[in-house]
Image: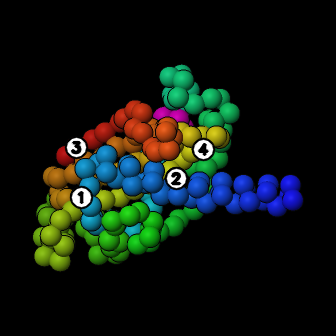
Amino acid sequence: MKKIFTLFLITISLSATAQDRRSLLQAAVKFSTAPDTFLLRDSVLQHFYSDWESDSILIAGLKSESYITPADIDFMLQQARASKKQTWTKDSIAGSVVISSKGLPNSLKQKKAAKQWTKYFSNHKTGYYEVSKPIFSKDGKTAIVYVSFQCGVNCGNGGASVYRWKNDKWILEKNLFSWRK
């Protein structure tokens, strides 16, 4: 009987963790002022910055501010490095309408990018969100998520934030960095 009860508790704990992670992504997107229904790029972002070294510095900096422990640093970096290319699905984040990366503007040249955005807006009347896979502390109660909104050559914003699990919900703890164009 004791084993069955323990198994039952573990099962409830695992399903609660999955729900907690979905609610984290929802909280991060809502903090980024996404409407109830929004376009989500299918590609899961793998970095907060464009390289591992900058991500490592960002994570290590959280220790000096007492957001995470030394053990969390290694745990979080392992998650980031082990991250494989994956895509979001319609069930990943509530309210999202997933769009393929293949049809999104991607040129770095201003003139070509402007044409790509004009074509994009003829199909979609709004910009799209990009979201990283959350990186969790060892106890699962602290997480970092990066969210950006892309809406044109000179339009967009984003950044990474720290969230804490408090009172059965994810609370924004600290904005790590943000950008606007």
Marks 4 and 2 close (CB-CB < 8 Å): yes
The residue identified by callout 1 is 35
**Sequence-wise, which precedes: disc 1 or disc 2?**
2
Is 73 left, or right, of 128 in this rendering? right
Place of residue 180 in the rendered image (x, y in percent of width and height, measured from the top left): 22, 43
Q: Residue at x 25, y 50 (%)?
A: 33
Label 3 Cα crowd, 10 Å radius (few <14 / some 14-19 / many 20+): few
**Sequence-wise, which precedes: disc 4 or disc 3?**
4
The residue identified by callout 2 is 20
Q: Residue at x 61, y 60 (%)?
A: 15
Does dot 4 land on a helix, a strand or a loop? Answer: loop
Comparing labels 4 and 3, the label whose residue is closer to the camera: 4
Label 2 Cα crowd, 10 Å radius (few <14 / some 14-19 / many 20+): some
Does dot 3 land on a helix, a strand or a loop? Answer: strand
- Magenta stretch secondary structure, dominant: helix
The residue identified by callout 4 is 140
The answer to whether one can see residue 26 in this image is yes
Does 140 lie within the magenta span? no
Number of marks in the image?
4
- Whole-angstrom CA distance, mark 3 to mark 1, is 19 Å
- Whole-angstrom CA distance, mark 1 to mark 2, is 21 Å
Q: Residue at x 29, y 75 (%)?
A: 103
Comparing labels 3 and 1, the label whose residue is closer to the camera: 1
**Sequence-wise, which precedes: disc 4 or disc 2?**
2
The residue identified by callout 3 is 180
Q: Nearer the viewer, residue 65 or 35?
A: 35
Magenta residues (range): 55-59
